Image (cartoon, rainbow, N blue to C red):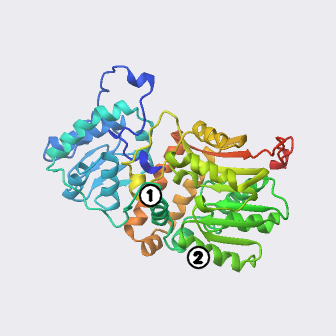
Amino acid sequence: MDAAEVAVRAATGTETATPADRTILRSPRAPTVPPAQRTDASGAPVANLHRAMSRALDRDDWRLVLWDGRAVGSASPQFTITMRSPAAVDRLLGGVPEKAFGRAYVEGLVNVDPLEPFLEPLAAAPVRQLFLAWPAIVAALLALGGRPRSAPVLAAEARLRGVRHSRRRDAEAIRHHYDLPPEFYALILDSQLTYSCAYFETPADDLDRAQASKLELICRKLRLQAGESLLDIGCGWGSLVIHAAEHHGVRAVGITLSPAQVKEGRRRVRERGLEDRVEIRLADYRDESGVYDAVASIGMVEHVGRAKLGVYSDAVYRSVRPGGRALIHGITQRPTRVWNRASFNDAFVFPDGELEDIGLMVRAYERAGFEVRDVESLREHYEMTLTQWAKRLRANWDEAVRIGGEQRALVWRLYLAGAAVSFRVGTLAIHQTLAVRPDEQGRVDIPLTRRDWYS
């Protein structure tokens, strides 16, 4: 899941300061735009906004264009920000910076082309630099006639009710993201609708091959054997349980809170003739009462929340028989970062989602009774996955707008670009954690080496 929250983290405190950031530093000198490149007929307002934003970005090789044709910046820009209406200025002043930018982008009031060269310097910038630049950005927006006004809640924005991470609210959060028609996801994902990070054995692998490799790697790490039972918590559209049944001979149960995923997953199970070996249920992880040889949870832990991480870990532990195995695959963040509840990601993409650092997650699993045996980062693999998803979205843009609506398509465009940047620069990672539940004698059913994973 986060990840486009890097889009505009200026002044939102999405990352705590490092020791170096805590020292009293002079404000970085704003890059200047050569007069020959300025085409602002009215003088200061547009140039001041470009200068203030250049301070935040620590680069000035970009161009700013307003709705009335006024423009300032590089003649050969790395990216261009276009404000298509005076309402764009109001929107940017109408809330915390990241969410305000996200609303303006999704509403079509602001465009950035291309996105990643704009997002990369934001992701790399020290938090202090962004804080220092923000007052000048606000002043320039006000000088352009902007007024802080409450922004409308958009159709693509989450509207959750109730207590955070209650069963009802968790179900609403999952449905916000996953209950789009499967045809929408088919435009972006691989042919099996496999979500989360793929596994690229070579950079030349296409998305279908890389996702099949991911499913196989998970099954190998779990050492699945014919006749064993597997539970997949957060099963998506069923790709893992189908793969495990077809290629490893297991009996598999998948659970999800998305009715749309249950419907499509069951259709895929019937299509493969696996009804006797695969079951997909609409269920909460807290309600699962079965015991299995192995448990997988792929891209689910991000939705749990820190307050429920212990409850989640206990639920996974209860579902694994003594001697059995569990594999949890999820996005992580640096321990120096603080999750931002006012982010674009929280408002539009994964409402109520929370990311933790891998150390905290491992401690939670071991407190539940697991013995963690292996932790592997697949950070580069997720950047490659997101890049391929974004490429597919661009290629199928008109159809994505037709199925999901323009706002939802724009959410995905910004989300995928921001997420790819986050994994590229290392503000986000993704880890596969293999844990075992020892029996009363401390025994577990795993070989002495990992050789079988890669042979």
Q: Which of marks 2 and 1 is nearer the N terminus?
A: 2
The answer to whether any part of residue 383 appears in the image is no
Residue 271 x/y as whole percent: 70, 79
Front residue of this view, candidates 27 and 318: 318
Q: Is residue 422 above or below residue 409?
A: above
Q: Is residue 227 above or below residue 307?
A: below
Q: Is residue 12 left or right of residue 426?
A: left
Residue found 46% across the figure and 56% down from its top = 350
Give the residue at mark 2.
Answer: 263
Residue found 72% across the figure and 68% down from its top = 242
Residue 101 x/y as whole percent: 32, 51
Residue farthest front in this picture: 440
Give the amino acid at mark 1: Val
Residue found 25% across the figure and 59% down from its top = 84
Q: How many labels does the image show?
A: 2
Indicate which label's residue lies in the foreground, 2 or 1. 2
Front residue of this view, candidates 82 and 361: 361
